[in-house]
Image: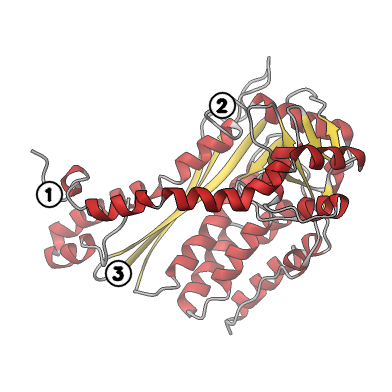
Amino acid sequence: MTAPGTAYGREYARLPEDLLADLLADAPVIADQVQALLGPALAMRAELRQAALAAGLVQQTAHGPAATSCAVDGGFAVERTVAVDIALSVAVGVEGFAPPGQACAWESNQYVSDFHVLGHDLDNERLARAAMIAQELDVLDRAPHEFRVYDGSHLTPVIQLNSGFSSRSVDVSGRAAELCARRELPSTLRAFATDPEIVAMPKYDSSRSLCDRLSGLVRQPVPGDDKYVAGLVLRGGEHTIPEQVHGPVWRQLHLSTPSADPEVVGLVAQCDAQLAPLTRFEMYSLYFRPDDTSPAYRVEVKPDLAHDADGLASLFGTLHAQMTGPFVREPYPQYLADVMAKSVSYGLSALQTAAQLALTRDNPELAQLVVHSYRTEGK
């Protein structure tokens, strides 16, 4: 018999059957809403493709020789116990399949982690996110590979870092600055914003630049987002031409802090100065579809790579070599880094249990406060 409190011991605490039945009864409504949202673009598929071809937006993908590659992703978790918050953040680097005849650049997967024991504060999650970003950029900067894939957009780290630096909690903003200084963030952020070897591949994409351009060509609204529409327009072995990013979301990127601490202010100012290439739109995006069974992938590249046909061919060849099958719908190292990093909650549970056992020997009363969570967590 499984003891109460284990994963199987909580099986009784599920959604009521009647509630689940009501949710399933609404499935046709959800299907209708999906059809209303995405169906019009699907019906326009042939027209959109013809317009994109006529405008020169689509190119055949040339596959150059595969290069060495890796991918980096991060994760964080905050355990809110009765007495304290325990925040854990990690970053993981995974090497891709080595090109034929070449050895691996890393002997094993790379990782860094940081944890903090904090008083209760809703901003503690901001600290965990900022720490995760600093760690991701640290692993990216030290990677020796010819292509390094960041799991996310170039926008993502700036937004998360600014959330940590701009916290009204002096403890959170101070700890974030101290950790980022230790990870040499000004240097790693500069490389992230300018190094053509670092490319970004976000899974989630709300951009509508391609949609708006096609809308002007066909003279009717094109619903959806760029990633979805690119998947309709492109066939296997094609990509869109690199397009320079634009819009207020890039121009307004910044890092700031309300802190009065000169060291915090100075670090944030140094980091903010590294964002100049991004705010000047020195970044390009494109979509490519390796084959007819795959989705379209968004890739953000620096200007030097966007204007280098051979470099792009090498990038496409490298990414295509990392596509392992229809069930892993992203490059293998990116997929594996994501799976590893998102398992951070298991690491936090282990850390919490080990701390509780250590406290049991010296102060059993405190041990109980550490092990009991402030609220129940979903799985």
Q: Nearer the viewer, mark 1 or mark 2?
A: 2
Question: Quick check: can you spot residue 255?
Answer: yes
Q: CA distance from mark 3 to mark 1?
A: 24 Å
Does dot 1 land on a helix, a strand or a loop?
loop
Q: Residue at x 82, y 26 (%)?
A: 62
- Residue 104, image quadrant: top right
Q: Position of residue 179 (x, y in %)?
A: 53, 63
Front residue of 21 and 235:
21
Mark 1 neighbour density, 10 Å: few (under 14) some (14–19) many (20 or more): few
Residue topped by disc 2: 326
Does dot 2 land on a helix, a strand or a loop?
loop
Residue topped by disc 3: 84
Q: Any mark on residue 379, and which? A: none
Q: Residue at x 40, y 48 (%)?
A: 344
Q: Position of residue 253 (x, y in %)?
A: 71, 67
Does dot 3 land on a helix, a strand or a loop?
loop
Q: Quadrant of the N terminus?
A: top left
Residue topped by disc 1: 4
Q: CA distance from mark 1 to mark 2?
A: 39 Å
Under mark 1, the amino acid is: Pro
